[in-house]
Image (cartoon, rainbow, N blue to C red):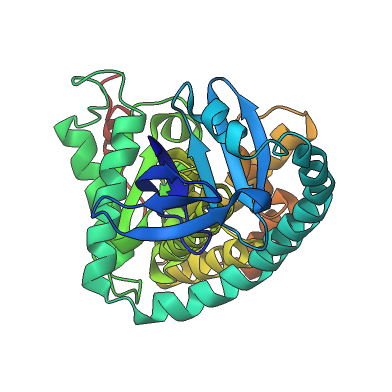
Amino acid sequence: MQTFDATYYDGQTAVRHAVTVHLYAEALDIVDADGQVIDQWSYQAINLSDQGGGITRLVVKDSAARLVLTAPKAFQALKKRAPNIDSQKQRTLRNMGLSVAVTVTLILGAYVSIPLMASAVVALIPYETEQNIGRGYAKDIQALFSKDEKSNKCTVDKGVKALNDMMAYLATHSFGPFAYQVKVIDNDMVNAMALPGGHIFIFRGLIDKAESSDELAGVLAHEMAHVDHRHGLHGVVRGFGFQMLSDMMFGGNVMGNLSNLMMMMSHSREAERQADIDAIAILRRANISTAGIARFFERLKDKEDEGKVSFFKIPTMLSSHPASDIREALAREIQSPSSMGWTLSDIQWQNLKAICGK
Protein backbone atom coordinates (compact mmCIF):
# COMPACT_ATOMS: atom_id res chain seq x y z
CA MET A 1 0.00 0.00 0.00
CA GLN A 2 1.26 3.45 -0.91
CA THR A 3 0.35 6.60 1.01
CA PHE A 4 0.88 10.31 0.50
CA ASP A 5 -0.36 13.57 1.98
CA ALA A 6 -3.02 15.67 0.25
CA THR A 7 -5.70 18.32 0.79
CA TYR A 8 -9.36 17.31 0.61
CA TYR A 9 -12.54 19.39 0.13
CA ASP A 10 -15.80 17.56 0.76
CA GLY A 11 -17.82 19.84 -1.56
CA GLN A 12 -20.29 20.66 1.21
CA THR A 13 -18.31 23.30 3.10
CA ALA A 14 -15.29 25.51 2.46
CA VAL A 15 -13.21 23.68 5.08
CA ARG A 16 -9.85 22.34 3.97
CA HIS A 17 -8.93 18.90 5.34
CA ALA A 18 -5.32 17.75 5.64
CA VAL A 19 -5.56 14.06 4.75
CA THR A 20 -3.53 11.00 3.90
CA VAL A 21 -4.39 9.09 0.72
CA HIS A 22 -4.05 5.29 0.84
CA LEU A 23 -3.80 3.54 -2.53
CA TYR A 24 -5.36 0.07 -2.73
CA ALA A 25 -5.99 -2.26 -5.66
CA GLU A 26 -9.41 -0.97 -6.77
CA ALA A 27 -9.84 2.33 -4.94
CA LEU A 28 -8.15 4.92 -2.80
CA ASP A 29 -9.11 5.80 0.76
CA ILE A 30 -9.03 9.37 2.06
CA VAL A 31 -8.07 9.29 5.73
CA ASP A 32 -8.32 12.22 8.14
CA ALA A 33 -5.93 13.20 10.94
CA ASP A 34 -7.75 10.88 13.37
CA GLY A 35 -7.20 7.89 11.12
CA GLN A 36 -10.82 7.73 10.00
CA VAL A 37 -11.71 7.01 6.38
CA ILE A 38 -13.83 10.00 5.33
CA ASP A 39 -14.18 9.13 1.64
CA GLN A 40 -13.34 6.38 -0.83
CA TRP A 41 -12.83 6.92 -4.55
CA SER A 42 -12.96 4.22 -7.22
CA TYR A 43 -10.14 4.63 -9.73
CA GLN A 44 -12.66 4.34 -12.57
CA ALA A 45 -14.54 7.40 -11.25
CA ILE A 46 -11.57 9.73 -10.78
CA ASN A 47 -11.15 12.65 -13.19
CA LEU A 48 -8.16 14.93 -13.64
CA SER A 49 -9.43 18.47 -13.17
CA ASP A 50 -6.21 20.39 -13.85
CA GLN A 51 -2.50 20.15 -13.31
CA GLY A 52 0.37 22.62 -13.14
CA GLY A 53 3.02 24.09 -10.92
CA GLY A 54 3.50 20.79 -9.13
CA ILE A 55 -0.16 20.69 -8.08
CA THR A 56 -2.70 18.14 -9.31
CA ARG A 57 -6.41 18.63 -8.70
CA LEU A 58 -8.71 15.65 -8.89
CA VAL A 59 -12.47 15.29 -8.86
CA VAL A 60 -14.67 12.23 -8.68
CA LYS A 61 -17.81 11.29 -10.57
CA ASP A 62 -21.17 12.20 -9.01
CA SER A 63 -19.61 14.23 -6.21
CA ALA A 64 -18.54 17.82 -5.54
CA ALA A 65 -15.54 16.63 -3.53
CA ARG A 66 -12.02 17.56 -4.63
CA LEU A 67 -8.56 16.23 -3.87
CA VAL A 68 -5.40 18.32 -4.25
CA LEU A 69 -2.08 16.50 -4.60
CA THR A 70 1.25 18.20 -4.03
CA ALA A 71 3.57 15.25 -3.34
CA PRO A 72 5.97 14.97 -6.33
CA LYS A 73 5.35 11.26 -7.05
CA ALA A 74 1.73 11.09 -5.94
CA PHE A 75 0.14 11.51 -9.36
CA GLN A 76 2.45 8.99 -11.02
CA ALA A 77 1.64 6.44 -8.32
CA LEU A 78 -2.06 7.08 -8.81
CA LYS A 79 -1.76 6.88 -12.60
CA LYS A 80 -0.39 3.34 -12.38
CA ARG A 81 -3.65 2.26 -10.75
CA ALA A 82 -5.90 4.51 -12.84
CA PRO A 83 -4.35 4.39 -16.34
CA ASN A 84 -7.36 6.09 -17.95
CA ILE A 85 -7.16 9.17 -15.77
CA ASP A 86 -5.51 11.29 -18.52
CA SER A 87 -8.11 10.33 -21.12
CA GLN A 88 -10.80 11.41 -18.72
CA LYS A 89 -9.46 14.97 -18.83
CA GLN A 90 -11.29 15.71 -22.07
CA ARG A 91 -14.55 14.63 -20.50
CA THR A 92 -13.75 16.85 -17.57
CA LEU A 93 -13.16 19.81 -19.90
CA ARG A 94 -16.51 19.22 -21.60
CA ASN A 95 -18.17 19.24 -18.23
CA MET A 96 -16.48 22.52 -17.38
CA GLY A 97 -18.92 24.37 -19.66
CA LEU A 98 -21.79 23.14 -17.54
CA SER A 99 -19.87 23.97 -14.38
CA VAL A 100 -19.30 27.53 -15.58
CA ALA A 101 -23.00 27.91 -16.35
CA VAL A 102 -23.92 26.63 -12.89
CA THR A 103 -21.35 28.97 -11.32
CA VAL A 104 -22.74 32.00 -13.15
CA THR A 105 -26.27 31.03 -12.09
CA LEU A 106 -25.19 30.72 -8.46
CA ILE A 107 -23.43 34.08 -8.56
CA LEU A 108 -26.43 35.82 -10.09
CA GLY A 109 -28.73 34.18 -7.57
CA ALA A 110 -26.45 35.23 -4.73
CA TYR A 111 -26.32 38.80 -6.07
CA VAL A 112 -30.09 38.99 -5.66
CA SER A 113 -30.65 36.89 -2.55
CA ILE A 114 -27.71 37.78 -0.29
CA PRO A 115 -28.69 41.49 0.09
CA LEU A 116 -32.23 40.41 0.96
CA MET A 117 -30.98 37.95 3.56
CA ALA A 118 -28.55 40.56 4.90
CA SER A 119 -31.42 42.76 6.11
CA ALA A 120 -32.86 39.89 8.13
CA VAL A 121 -29.47 39.04 9.62
CA VAL A 122 -28.67 42.66 10.52
CA ALA A 123 -31.95 42.94 12.43
CA LEU A 124 -30.77 40.10 14.70
CA ILE A 125 -27.37 41.61 15.52
CA PRO A 126 -27.27 43.58 18.82
CA TYR A 127 -25.95 47.14 18.73
CA GLU A 128 -23.12 46.22 21.10
CA THR A 129 -21.95 43.51 18.71
CA GLU A 130 -22.06 45.97 15.83
CA GLN A 131 -19.88 48.38 17.81
CA ASN A 132 -17.31 45.63 18.37
CA ILE A 133 -17.35 44.79 14.66
CA GLY A 134 -16.86 48.46 13.83
CA ARG A 135 -13.87 48.76 16.15
CA GLY A 136 -12.16 45.90 14.35
CA TYR A 137 -12.73 47.43 10.93
CA ALA A 138 -11.65 50.85 12.20
CA LYS A 139 -8.26 49.37 13.08
CA ASP A 140 -8.06 47.81 9.60
CA ILE A 141 -8.86 51.14 7.93
CA GLN A 142 -6.22 52.99 9.94
CA ALA A 143 -3.64 50.30 9.18
CA LEU A 144 -4.54 50.38 5.48
CA PHE A 145 -3.84 54.10 5.18
CA SER A 146 -0.87 54.26 7.55
CA LYS A 147 2.56 54.59 5.99
CA ASP A 148 4.32 53.91 9.28
CA GLU A 149 3.63 53.99 13.02
CA LYS A 150 3.94 57.77 13.14
CA SER A 151 1.70 58.49 10.18
CA ASN A 152 -2.04 58.99 10.11
CA LYS A 153 -1.89 61.28 13.14
CA CYS A 154 -4.38 64.02 12.36
CA THR A 155 -4.70 64.90 16.02
CA VAL A 156 -3.80 68.58 16.37
CA ASP A 157 -5.69 69.52 19.55
CA LYS A 158 -7.53 72.61 18.31
CA GLY A 159 -8.54 70.88 15.10
CA VAL A 160 -9.81 67.81 16.95
CA LYS A 161 -11.83 70.02 19.29
CA ALA A 162 -13.43 71.89 16.40
CA LEU A 163 -14.32 68.63 14.64
CA ASN A 164 -15.69 67.10 17.83
CA ASP A 165 -17.74 70.25 18.50
CA MET A 166 -19.31 69.93 15.05
CA MET A 167 -19.92 66.21 15.54
CA ALA A 168 -21.46 66.70 18.99
CA TYR A 169 -23.79 69.41 17.72
CA LEU A 170 -24.97 67.29 14.78
CA ALA A 171 -25.42 64.28 17.07
CA THR A 172 -27.96 66.16 19.18
CA HIS A 173 -30.14 66.40 16.08
CA SER A 174 -29.84 62.77 15.03
CA PHE A 175 -32.07 60.00 16.33
CA GLY A 176 -29.59 57.17 15.73
CA PRO A 177 -28.77 54.50 18.33
CA PHE A 178 -25.00 54.97 18.32
CA ALA A 179 -22.47 57.38 19.78
CA TYR A 180 -20.51 58.74 16.82
CA GLN A 181 -16.71 58.68 16.77
CA VAL A 182 -15.09 60.70 14.01
CA LYS A 183 -11.42 60.61 13.01
CA VAL A 184 -9.39 62.12 10.19
CA ILE A 185 -7.08 60.09 7.97
CA ASP A 186 -3.99 61.87 6.64
CA ASN A 187 -4.56 61.07 2.99
CA ASP A 188 -5.30 63.37 0.04
CA MET A 189 -8.23 61.24 -1.14
CA VAL A 190 -11.45 63.26 -1.18
CA ASN A 191 -13.65 60.81 0.64
CA ALA A 192 -15.46 59.89 3.83
CA MET A 193 -16.78 56.59 5.12
CA ALA A 194 -19.06 55.26 7.83
CA LEU A 195 -18.25 51.98 9.56
CA PRO A 196 -20.59 49.87 11.69
CA GLY A 197 -21.32 51.04 15.21
CA GLY A 198 -20.75 54.79 14.85
CA HIS A 199 -17.21 55.01 13.46
CA ILE A 200 -16.77 57.74 10.84
CA PHE A 201 -13.59 58.54 8.92
CA ILE A 202 -12.96 61.78 7.03
CA PHE A 203 -9.99 62.01 4.69
CA ARG A 204 -7.76 65.07 4.84
CA GLY A 205 -8.30 65.58 1.11
CA LEU A 206 -12.01 66.15 1.70
CA ILE A 207 -11.32 68.70 4.44
CA ASP A 208 -8.86 70.45 2.13
CA LYS A 209 -11.50 70.66 -0.61
CA ALA A 210 -14.31 71.81 1.67
CA GLU A 211 -14.76 75.58 1.44
CA SER A 212 -16.95 76.08 4.51
CA SER A 213 -17.96 74.31 7.69
CA ASP A 214 -21.51 73.74 6.45
CA GLU A 215 -20.13 71.74 3.51
CA LEU A 216 -18.27 69.46 5.90
CA ALA A 217 -21.31 69.31 8.18
CA GLY A 218 -23.34 68.05 5.23
CA VAL A 219 -20.84 65.27 4.55
CA LEU A 220 -20.78 64.31 8.24
CA ALA A 221 -24.58 64.24 8.36
CA HIS A 222 -24.58 61.95 5.32
CA GLU A 223 -22.17 59.52 7.01
CA MET A 224 -24.18 59.71 10.25
CA ALA A 225 -27.25 58.63 8.29
CA HIS A 226 -25.33 55.60 6.98
CA VAL A 227 -24.48 54.73 10.59
CA ASP A 228 -28.08 55.19 11.76
CA HIS A 229 -29.41 52.88 9.05
CA ARG A 230 -26.65 50.32 9.74
CA HIS A 231 -25.59 50.39 6.10
CA GLY A 232 -22.01 49.46 6.99
CA LEU A 233 -23.19 46.36 8.84
CA HIS A 234 -25.32 45.42 5.84
CA GLY A 235 -22.11 45.54 3.78
CA VAL A 236 -20.27 43.35 6.28
CA VAL A 237 -23.03 40.72 6.18
CA ARG A 238 -23.12 40.85 2.36
CA GLY A 239 -19.35 40.43 2.29
CA PHE A 240 -19.47 37.37 4.53
CA GLY A 241 -22.24 35.92 2.39
CA PHE A 242 -20.23 36.26 -0.81
CA GLN A 243 -17.11 35.05 1.04
CA MET A 244 -18.86 31.84 2.09
CA LEU A 245 -20.16 31.31 -1.45
CA SER A 246 -16.72 31.80 -3.02
CA ASP A 247 -15.09 29.48 -0.47
CA MET A 248 -17.63 26.75 -1.16
CA MET A 249 -17.27 27.11 -4.94
CA PHE A 250 -13.54 27.69 -5.31
CA GLY A 251 -12.00 26.68 -1.99
CA GLY A 252 -9.73 28.79 0.16
CA ASN A 253 -9.97 32.48 0.96
CA VAL A 254 -10.61 33.94 -2.52
CA MET A 255 -11.94 37.23 -1.19
CA GLY A 256 -9.40 38.88 1.10
CA ASN A 257 -9.84 41.43 3.87
CA LEU A 258 -9.54 44.31 1.40
CA SER A 259 -12.42 42.91 -0.65
CA ASN A 260 -14.54 42.68 2.47
CA LEU A 261 -13.67 46.28 3.39
CA MET A 262 -14.69 47.46 -0.07
CA MET A 263 -17.94 45.54 0.18
CA MET A 264 -18.65 47.22 3.51
CA MET A 265 -17.92 50.71 2.17
CA SER A 266 -20.05 50.35 -0.94
CA HIS A 267 -23.74 51.08 -0.66
CA SER A 268 -26.69 50.67 -2.99
CA ARG A 269 -28.12 53.69 -4.77
CA GLU A 270 -31.20 53.44 -2.58
CA ALA A 271 -29.01 53.47 0.56
CA GLU A 272 -27.16 56.54 -0.72
CA ARG A 273 -30.42 58.32 -1.49
CA GLN A 274 -31.71 57.41 1.96
CA ALA A 275 -28.55 58.85 3.52
CA ASP A 276 -28.90 62.04 1.45
CA ILE A 277 -32.50 62.57 2.56
CA ASP A 278 -31.71 61.90 6.22
CA ALA A 279 -28.62 64.12 6.08
CA ILE A 280 -30.74 67.03 4.90
CA ALA A 281 -33.24 66.30 7.68
CA ILE A 282 -30.43 66.39 10.26
CA LEU A 283 -29.13 69.68 8.85
CA ARG A 284 -32.57 71.25 8.93
CA ARG A 285 -33.16 70.20 12.55
CA ALA A 286 -29.72 71.58 13.40
CA ASN A 287 -30.52 74.85 11.60
CA ILE A 288 -27.51 74.41 9.30
CA SER A 289 -27.82 75.65 5.73
CA THR A 290 -28.21 72.87 3.17
CA ALA A 291 -26.63 75.20 0.63
CA GLY A 292 -23.25 73.87 1.78
CA ILE A 293 -23.91 70.27 0.85
CA ALA A 294 -25.55 71.47 -2.39
CA ARG A 295 -22.36 73.40 -3.29
CA PHE A 296 -20.27 70.36 -2.46
CA PHE A 297 -22.36 68.18 -4.80
CA GLU A 298 -22.21 70.89 -7.46
CA ARG A 299 -18.41 70.84 -7.45
CA LEU A 300 -18.51 67.05 -7.51
CA LYS A 301 -20.72 67.25 -10.59
CA ASP A 302 -18.28 69.65 -12.27
CA LYS A 303 -15.41 67.21 -11.66
CA GLU A 304 -17.48 64.36 -13.11
CA ASP A 305 -18.35 66.46 -16.17
CA GLU A 306 -14.65 67.19 -16.69
CA GLY A 307 -13.84 63.50 -16.42
CA LYS A 308 -11.65 64.07 -13.37
CA VAL A 309 -11.82 61.49 -10.62
CA SER A 310 -10.89 63.62 -7.65
CA PHE A 311 -13.96 63.11 -5.48
CA PHE A 312 -14.80 59.68 -4.08
CA LYS A 313 -11.77 58.03 -5.66
CA ILE A 314 -12.66 54.51 -4.50
CA PRO A 315 -14.26 52.85 -7.57
CA THR A 316 -17.01 51.15 -5.58
CA MET A 317 -18.00 54.50 -4.18
CA LEU A 318 -18.17 55.93 -7.70
CA SER A 319 -20.43 53.10 -8.78
CA SER A 320 -22.72 53.25 -5.78
CA HIS A 321 -23.21 56.97 -5.22
CA PRO A 322 -26.18 58.35 -7.14
CA ALA A 323 -25.46 60.82 -9.90
CA SER A 324 -24.34 63.98 -8.17
CA ASP A 325 -26.62 66.24 -10.21
CA ILE A 326 -29.59 64.33 -8.78
CA ARG A 327 -28.22 64.74 -5.26
CA GLU A 328 -27.56 68.43 -5.83
CA ALA A 329 -31.13 68.93 -7.05
CA LEU A 330 -32.43 67.04 -4.02
CA ALA A 331 -30.48 69.25 -1.63
CA ARG A 332 -31.61 72.47 -3.31
CA GLU A 333 -35.22 71.29 -3.51
CA ILE A 334 -35.47 70.52 0.20
CA GLN A 335 -33.33 73.47 1.26
CA SER A 336 -35.04 75.74 3.74
CA PRO A 337 -34.52 79.43 2.93
CA SER A 338 -34.38 80.20 6.65
CA SER A 339 -31.54 77.74 7.32
CA MET A 340 -28.90 80.35 8.06
CA GLY A 341 -28.01 79.28 11.61
CA TRP A 342 -25.21 77.33 13.25
CA THR A 343 -21.70 77.26 11.85
CA LEU A 344 -18.15 77.06 13.14
CA SER A 345 -16.43 80.37 13.74
CA ASP A 346 -13.71 81.37 11.29
CA ILE A 347 -11.05 80.48 13.87
CA GLN A 348 -12.63 77.08 14.57
CA TRP A 349 -12.86 76.36 10.86
CA GLN A 350 -9.22 77.23 10.26
CA ASN A 351 -8.23 75.06 13.23
CA LEU A 352 -10.19 72.16 11.77
CA LYS A 353 -8.60 72.67 8.35
CA ALA A 354 -5.20 72.36 10.05
CA ILE A 355 -6.09 69.22 12.03
CA CYS A 356 -3.29 67.24 10.35
CA GLY A 357 -0.72 69.94 11.02
CA LYS A 358 -0.44 70.92 7.36
Q: Residue furthest left?
A: 157
Give coordinates of residue 161: x percent, y percent. Answer: 18, 43
- Residue 59 image offset from top left, x and y in percent: 62, 48
Is 155 drawn above or below residue 20 in the view shown? Answer: above
Q: Nearer the viewer, residue 262 or 75?
A: 75
Compared to 327, does 254 lie above or below? Answer: above
Residue at the farthest front position: 25
- Residue 92 is drawn in which quadrant? top right
Quadrant where the image shows the N terminus: top left
Residue at the image point whose x is 39% and y is 70% from the top? 228
Side of 280 relative to 136 (left or right): right
Q: Quadrant of residue 99?
A: bottom right
As rendered, which of 164 and 228 lies closer to the eye? 228
**Which of the image's four quarters has the C terminus?**
top left
Question: Residue 172 or 335: which is nearer the viewer?
Answer: 172
**112 is higher (above) or lower (below) than 253:** below
Image coordinates for residue 220, horizontal then vertical, percent: 41, 53
Q: Is residue 346 in view?
A: no
Instruction: Judge whether residue 357 can be spotted in this image.
Output: yes
Closest to the observer: 215 or 85? 85
Is 249 left or right of 97, judged from the image as shown? left
Residue 201 drawn at (x, y percent): 36, 44
Label total for image: 0
Q: Residue at x 34, y 74 (%)?
A: 176
In percent of the image, x 30 and y 63: which residue is there? Answer: 197
